[in-house]
């Protein structure tokens, strides 16, 4: 509040006084709010440079802190020109460590929100390059999902290509199964064909139908697949129809089959169509 009413020169002097302790203040549960407020109210090249110089030496610590990561996110959103480059550079240097950290992944997503031009392209490419490492991580999977939510067919193809050969295994894991579902809803025909081919093989389909996470991938597949893909899926599901009513997951899939492939279901019953409890929180 004091910063808001001071003149620019007075604000500058205040920031100069605060600069040596700005990182420590950012780590404090109350101080982080004060620093974020300063970043909202104060503008100007000299002030922003002071802030950047004060935070840069301890940036890695700040990005992973419960309180200070919000200051870093605010810097990404408010620092003008190239004065936030030190954050983008640090994220790229420690990409997997930041992207798979509980608070670091939030900083990375804000970087993807605010980066421009070649900087954004470089960050997106890092996500693609490290998709195999991040997709099954409890925090890194959200970064991969961020890319898929852009609904850029080329990017989705690159994500699918990065995990091709492991899709059925990833569909059976808690966090990566969400990403595979996102690929189904944001990809093009090539993505759909690649995913269908891998998850409906004789060796994989029976496992996915009754898996706590894989069954949701099959349910999603039945919801979004086109006519040609549904024909192939139906042919591969047919040998498993008798077992579907024996498990909770199978009953849910049977309910989807009734809607998507009524001839295959032969007028069969349903299930509760319930959803799991680990929806993405992005």
Image (tube, rainbow, N blue to C red):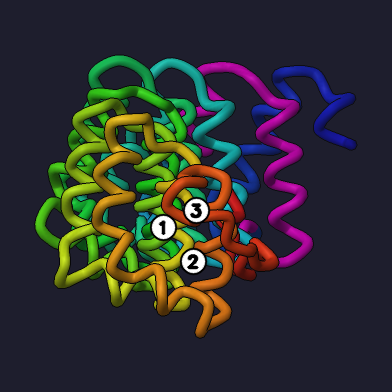
Q: Which residue is mark 1?
A: 217
* Residue at (19, 52) in percent of width and height: 130
User: Which label number is shown at residue 102?
Assistant: 2
Q: Are marks 2 and 3 in contact (CB under 8 Å)?
A: no
Residue 224 in the image, given as x and y percentages of width and height: 45, 37
Of badges 1 and 2, nearer the viewer stands 1
Element type at mark 2:
loop
Above or below residue 171? Residue 152 is above
Magenta-tinted stretch: 26-51
Task: Report the side of 240 relative to 46 (left or right).
Answer: left
Above or below residue 80? Residue 164 is below
Element type at mark 1:
helix
Quadrant in which the N terminus is drawn: top right
**Viewer-side residue, 88 vs 149:** 149
Task: Report the side of 100 relative to 121 (left or right).
Answer: right
Mark 1 or mark 2: which comes first in sequence?
2
Residue 213 is one of the magenta-drawn residues? no
* Residue at (44, 63) in percent of width and height: 139
**Viewer-side residue, 226 vs 89:** 226
User: Which label number is shown at residue 150?
Assistant: none
Mark 3 or mark 1: which comes first in sequence?
1
């Amino acid at each position: 509040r004091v910063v808001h009413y001071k003149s620019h020169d007075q604000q500058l002097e205040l920031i100069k006084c605060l600069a040596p302790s700005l990182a420590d203040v950012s780590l404090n549960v109350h101080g982080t709010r004060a620093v974020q407020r300063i970043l909202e109210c104060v503008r100007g090249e000299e002030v922003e440079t002071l802030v950047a110089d004060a935070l840069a030496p301890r940036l890695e610590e700040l990005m992973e802190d419960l309180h200070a990561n919000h200051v870093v996110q605010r810097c990404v959103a408010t620092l003008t020109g190239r004065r936030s480059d030190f954050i983008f550079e640090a994220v790229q240097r420690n990409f997997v460590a930041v992207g798979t950290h509980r608070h670091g992944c939030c900083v990375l997503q804000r970087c993807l929100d605010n980066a421009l031009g070649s900087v954004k392209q470089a960050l997106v490419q890092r996500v693609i390059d490290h998709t195999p490492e991040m997709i099954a991580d409890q925090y890194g999977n959200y970064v991969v999902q961020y890319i898929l939510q852009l609904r850029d067919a080329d990017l989705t193809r690159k994500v699918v290509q990065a995990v091709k050969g492991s899709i059925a295994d990833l569909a059976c894991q808690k966090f990566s199964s969400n990403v595979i579902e996102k690929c189904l809803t944001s990809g093009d025909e090539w993505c759909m064909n690649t995913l269908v081919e891998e998850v409906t093989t004789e060796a994989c389909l029976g496992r996915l139908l009754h898996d706590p996470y894989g069954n949701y991938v099959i349910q999603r597949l039945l919801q979004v697949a086109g006519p040609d893909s549904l024909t192939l899926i139906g042919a591969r599901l047919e040998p498993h129809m008798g077992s579907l009513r024996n498990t909770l997951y199978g009953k849910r899939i049977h309910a989807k089959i009734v809607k998507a492939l009524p001839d295959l279901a032969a007028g069969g019953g349903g299930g509760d169509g319930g959803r799991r409890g680990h929806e993405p929180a992005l």
